[in-house]
Amino acid sequence: MKNNAGDIKILYPLSLKELGNLCEEFPDALLFAGGTQLMRTIKEDPRCLISLNAIRELTRIRRKENYIEIGSCVTLSRILSLGENVVPIALYKAISAAVGPSIRNTATIGGNICTISHISDLIAPLVLYDARVELRTLSGIHWLPLLRFIQTHEKTGIVAGETLLVIRIPLEEWDMQTFIKTDIIHSPKLSVLKCAAAVRTNKNSINDLRLVFGGISPIVLRSRELEGILIGDKLPLQKKSIDLFCSELTKLLETKKEDFLPHPYHFGTAIRFTRYFLSSLNTG
């Protein structure tokens, strides 16, 4: 199906096969679903748009024992409707804090990812859970860790001839998990902070610890080396262990500070959040 709006051709494929054919025929076409960021992200009027909204395969949700798969065109409000017992808590909180109810009814999880900018609130919690994305290209379909997808595409989002089909999120047991985001600060330089954290314990010691921070550039920051510092430590954590961890985090953030967390408030909040989260393990 197609529709012409002025000089812009809008196409409405009904299946992935039809989508593939259209992508080959119109390699420069811009793909969109909810369209909430469309006007913000494009720099000039596209000649051709391809809507993904009529493709059923992209609006499906499948829950398995170890993971949940969410089609790229599933709206944020629909994900929230699954409830906190299904959606991992940090992701649930991120969606709740991302936008207002009216926009959540239109905005999609795939669109939030492919925007790849400081307004992409879902990237940090999805990286926290080691989410993977299924991509369709002209050469076939393959899976890619979300963190690698972001690092590969940087700020360009989906490239020509590529379609994000599904986001797969592992379902794991966590003793504590959370997400916060701060207000955007525009002066003296654009700055924002998102924090996602999760911890799992075993026999009163830390078995897995994850911390992901969202900022400006890079969009997300995660250090497995930093996370490993406290693996195996017994609870309650000693003050010197928490101090050491926060000291190493400070050093890491200092190397990224100018572009990642330009504003001192966000820099300090990242440290305070981490200290509070680790201290909470002793009382949780």
Image (spheres, rainbow, N blue to C red):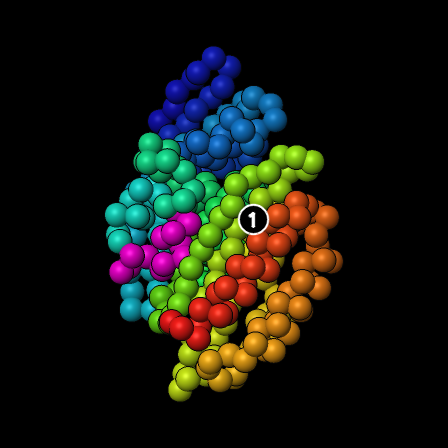
Image quarter of the N terminus? top left
Disc 1 on helix, strand or loop?
Answer: loop
Q: How many marks?
A: 1
Q: Residue furthest bottom?
A: 203
Residue at (56% x, 48% y) in the render: 193
Q: Is residue 233 left or right of residue 177?
A: right
Q: Position of residue 246 (x, y in %)?
A: 62, 67
Residue at (41% x, 57% y) in the render: 90
Task: Relative to 202, say whether 151 is above or below.
Answer: above
Image quarter of the C terminus? bottom left
Given the image, on which type of amino acid does mark 1 rest?
A: Leu
Judging depth in this view, the residue of 18 and 160 nearest the camera is: 160
In terms of image quadrants, where is residue 28?
Answer: top right
Q: Is residue 86 magenta?
A: yes
Residue at (51% x, 45% y) in the render: 182
Residue at (27% x, 60% y) in the render: 85
Q: Is residue 156 visible?
A: no
Graded by Cα atoms within 10 Å as few (under 14), some (14 to 19) or many (20 or more), the crowding at tag 1 reads many
Q: Which residue is mark 1?
A: 193
Q: Is residue 268 visible?
A: yes
Q: Is residue 219 left or right of residue 99?
A: right
Judging depth in this view, the residue of 36 and 30 nearest the camera is: 36
Q: Is residue 254 magenta?
A: no
Residue range (magenta): 84-95
Judging depth in this view, the residue of 58 and 247 nearest the camera is: 247
Q: Position of residue 162 (x, y in %)?
A: 52, 44
Q: Is residue 223 left or right of residue 201?
A: right
Q: Position of residue 237 (x, y in %)?
A: 51, 79
Q: Position of residue 67 (x, y in %)?
A: 35, 64
